[in-house]
Image: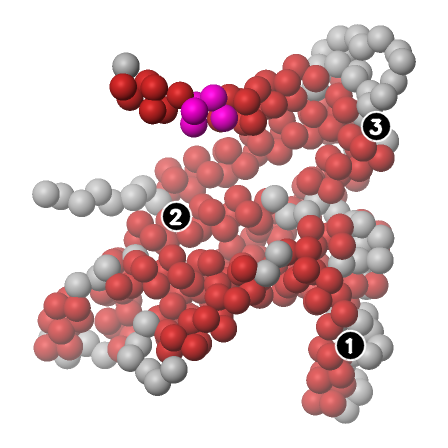
Amino acid sequence: MTAALFSAPAVALLVLFLIAPFVAAVLLSFTDQRLSSPLPVSFTGLENYARLFSNPQFWQAFGNNTLFAVIVVPVQTAAALGLAVLVNRALPGRVLFRTIYFLPTVTVMAVAAVIWKLLLLPEGGLVNGVLGAVSFGHVQPGWLSSTGWAMPAIVITSIWQGVGFQMVIFLAGLQAIPQSLYEAARVDGANAWQQFRHVTVPGLRNTLIFVVNVTAIFAFRLFDQVYLMPQFPGGPLDSTRTMMLQLLQTGYSRRMIGQASAIAVIFFLFVLAVTLIQRRLGREERAVR
């Protein structure tokens, strides 16, 4: 009874803000519910799902989401691990460097997107100014106005903003590895790379699995950057359209709540499947006592 009373507020909030909305989305996905429509709601079965699976724009959004995750998850994880190893060393000013690397994480993504939109302007932007000076004017891409450069711009912004969060998690994991393991490795003649490969990476196994899972979930939730950075949401020729943007525009711009609910259900099931596969492939090691 005591445990039930203590957990009741948290359970109530989970039911109210997580379970109930998802159940409502599942039910609405089988209807033709519209936003602010006087027409009666009717049951349509799997019609919303059939329309989505035959919609090229939906598959483009799905492909963009997958491409973004495939690029961001390994690159951001590797960058965060590298920064964590760097600032974990006893170097002068390492506290300052930790703060600098972590600062973008506390920046709201909407603000970061606007800042990077200004930095990536084709004319007058700092990035193109530097690239033009280095390449003598030969490399000045139209970042957010080009189908080939729009997604890389989104990727760069996302990694810059999120890498500090994973760095802090890796840093905590590094500090939990016993120093005696490194001392034993040095006694056996292991160099820096061998210590990293045979001591650091195995010691960070559980941390690495957690970081990859969280980064993948965040990657599939991509929305703010693709909504705010391009001139039009979704970018040129929908090159940066994502499932979250597709959901928003379907539900609120086109007022098709039933079909938007179907997108939400598909998105949830896909992210759940990816998470379960990741956990299956990389089981966490339990400490033996």
Residue positioned 33% across, 18% down in the render: 4
Look at label 1 and name its amino acid. Gly
* Residue located 49% across and 26% down the image: 14
Q: Where does the N terminus fall, quadrant-wise?
A: top left
Q: Nearer the viewer, residue 214 or 186?
A: 214
The residue identified by callout 1 is 125
Distance between the alpha carbons at the discs numbered 3 and 2: 37 Å
Q: Position of residue 164 (x, y in %)?
A: 48, 63
Horizontal side, residue 1 vs residue 247: left or right: left
Q: Main secondary structure of the magenta part?
A: helix
Task: Give the vertical position of 208 relative to 54 (above or below).
Answer: below
How many residues crowd mark 1 within 10 Å: few (<14), some (14–19), many (20+)? some
* Mark 2 surroundings within 10 Å by alpha-carbon count, few (fewer than 14), some (14 through 19), many (20 or more): some
N-terminal-most mark, 1 or 3: 1
Residue 23 lies in the magenta-colored region = no
Q: Is residue 11 above or below residue 200?
A: above
Residue 10 magenta-highlighted: yes
Q: Secondary structure at mark 3?
A: loop
Residue beneath label 2, please? 210
Which image quarter holds the C terminus? top left
Colour scheme of the picture: secondary structure
Q: Rounded to the nearest whole Å, what is the CA distance between mark 1 and mark 2?
A: 36 Å
Q: Left or right of 118: which side holds 107? A: left
Tell me, for residue 266, which label it has, or none: none
Q: Amino acid at mark 3?
A: Arg
First to last magenta residue range = 9-13
Q: Position of residue 233 (x, y in %)?
A: 80, 50
Task: Name the residue carrying label 3.
Answer: 255
